[in-house]
Image (spheres, rainbow, N blue to C red):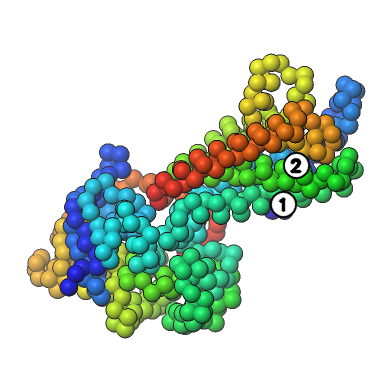
Amino acid sequence: MEPIIQVSHLTKKFGGFTAVDDISFSVQPGEIFAFLGPNGAGKSTTIKMLTTLLTPTSGTITLNGHNPATDASAVRKSFGIVFQDPSLDDELTAWENMEFHGVIYGVPKPLRRERINQLLKFVELEDRRNSLVKEFSGGMRRRLEIARGLLHHPKVIFLDEPTLGLDPQTRNHMWGYLQELNKSEGITVFLTTHYMEEADRVAQRIAIIDHGKIIALGTSAELKEKTGKSSLEDAFLEFTGKVIRDEEAGTVDAMRRRGQMWRGGGRR
Amino acid sequence: MIGSLGQPILFLLALGYGLGSVFQAAGQGNYFDFLAPGVIGMSIIFTAVFSGIDLIWDRQFGFLKETMAAPVSRINIMIGRTLGGATVATLQGIIVFIITLFFGFRPYNWALVPVAILFMLLVAFLFTALGNMIGSLLQDMQGFQLIMNFLVMPLFFLSGALFPIAGLPSVLTVVVKFDPLSYGIDSFRALLLNLGNFGLGLDFAVLAGVTIVFLGLGSYFFSKIQI
């Protein structure tokens, strides 16, 4: 079967810093694929290149038959995305946020209504459809973003650290949604995470990425077997080493912290 | 919106009544009347530029990100943002205008007030486009402080909003002539007080021309944003 995502020798440099270093992989349609790696590994950068938000320095990407760098519009219709940082409009209701998405993705009106209802029900938010998003907790916002990302029935859904900072119940529900979607709709799920148990539990294939390079790729069982370890966590540490990484706080991190000061709760 | 009205009102009260007698004594007439268009312009420029700069936050942590991943052209997003920002800034200007009425300001010809509002809209567009352009270029909020202090403040203070341009030394006069806001304030003064300096035609030409340039540049830089 033709892979739905094909990445070949993808590199991204920011000035002198190489965030993504010549990675290649492919994702099959209907697969749940995870990028597992520590912070600063290049996971978010890769997703941004796949989703047309950044242009690669070199290498090629094919998503649903199109190249994000040259054919952005066609690619954008093929995927939905749930970002690491929130992207909802706080001053609108859940319904209105979904409506807006439907309009800009060209979902026709009668279909929109039906799908919004169905999706809000799926993420268990249908009784809050007319509440303003600013009243929502972090977990509720996440769920709404998932519902929204699916509205236009994309072939692939990207999730960047989908359960970061969420409570265990919401995390559990999120994993349930992803598996359900994958099973019933055949939707390809591409997620990034640094939670072992998330990758282990949800993903069918895992790529371990560190310092911009893919250092291991396979099913959870294969990775454990390769390192002779019984848990994915130990296998991971075997691949990436146990030294603590000191990261430079980027401008985005600074803004995130400031946001948490000024906007109370911030993104959680 | 209500909170940001504080500054123009403060200016009106403090400067209008504070410097009023000095202005009068210098033979320039009613300072409060002179000041009113300036303060209207003030609320427009600050609101407009700020809405553009809010982009820096919005593109990482806000709704803008959703629109950038969507199959919508960047130009459309930019136009939408500019229209929205300009509308809010113009409304601010109108509210300040209404407040000046409460303080006794009266336009010399009410029929010209709608025209003045159109000019307010034009000024709002100009500065929202500028704000969007700056927001597209800056990487983080640190630059924002710099912009406010070294760009917007000078643009405001050197626009003839607070003092007449006529008596300025030639160096400053040149700067004033390069400041788009000067033409905006001048048009407000012309339409509300019949006290214009540059001529309404020139005001319109400069404002429209600069707005088009900023819209063009703003769209270009906006389209190049990488998150």
Which quarter of the figure has residue A161? bottom left
Subunit ID for the residue under disc 1: B
**Nearest the eye: B66 or B144:** B66
**Nearest the eye: A264 or B197:** B197
- Residue A1 location in percent, x, y? 17, 73
Disc 1 from disc 2: Cα separation? 10 Å
Query: Is the same chain shared between marks 1 and 2?
Result: yes
> Residue A85, can we see it?
no
**Nearest the eye: B137 or B57:** B137
Subunit ID for the residue under disc 2: B
Q: Earlier in the sequence, mark 1 or mark 2?
A: 2
**What residue is rendered at 19% in x and 64% in y?**
A26
From what the image shows, is residue B124 above or below residue B149?
Answer: below
Q: Residues within 10 Å of mark 1 (few under 14, many from 20)?
A: many
- Residue B171 location in percent, x, y? 65, 17
Which quarter of the figure has residue B53? top right
- Residue A129 location in percent, x, y? 55, 77
The three-letter code of the residue at mark 1 reads Leu
Q: Residue furthest top?
A: B170
Q: Disc 2 marks which residue?
A: B40
Q: Which mark is residue B57?
A: none
For mark 1, give the secondary structure.
helix
> Residue A252, can we see it?
yes
A21 relative position to B161: left or right: left
A226 relative position to B58: left or right: left
Q: Does the residue at mark 1 contact the one at mark 2 (Cβ under 8 Å)?
A: no
Q: Disc 1 marks which residue?
A: B91
For mark 2, give the secondary structure.
helix
- Residue A221 location in percent, x, y? 14, 73
Q: Residues within 10 Å of mark 2 (few under 14, many from 20)?
A: many
The three-letter code of the residue at mark 2 reads Ile
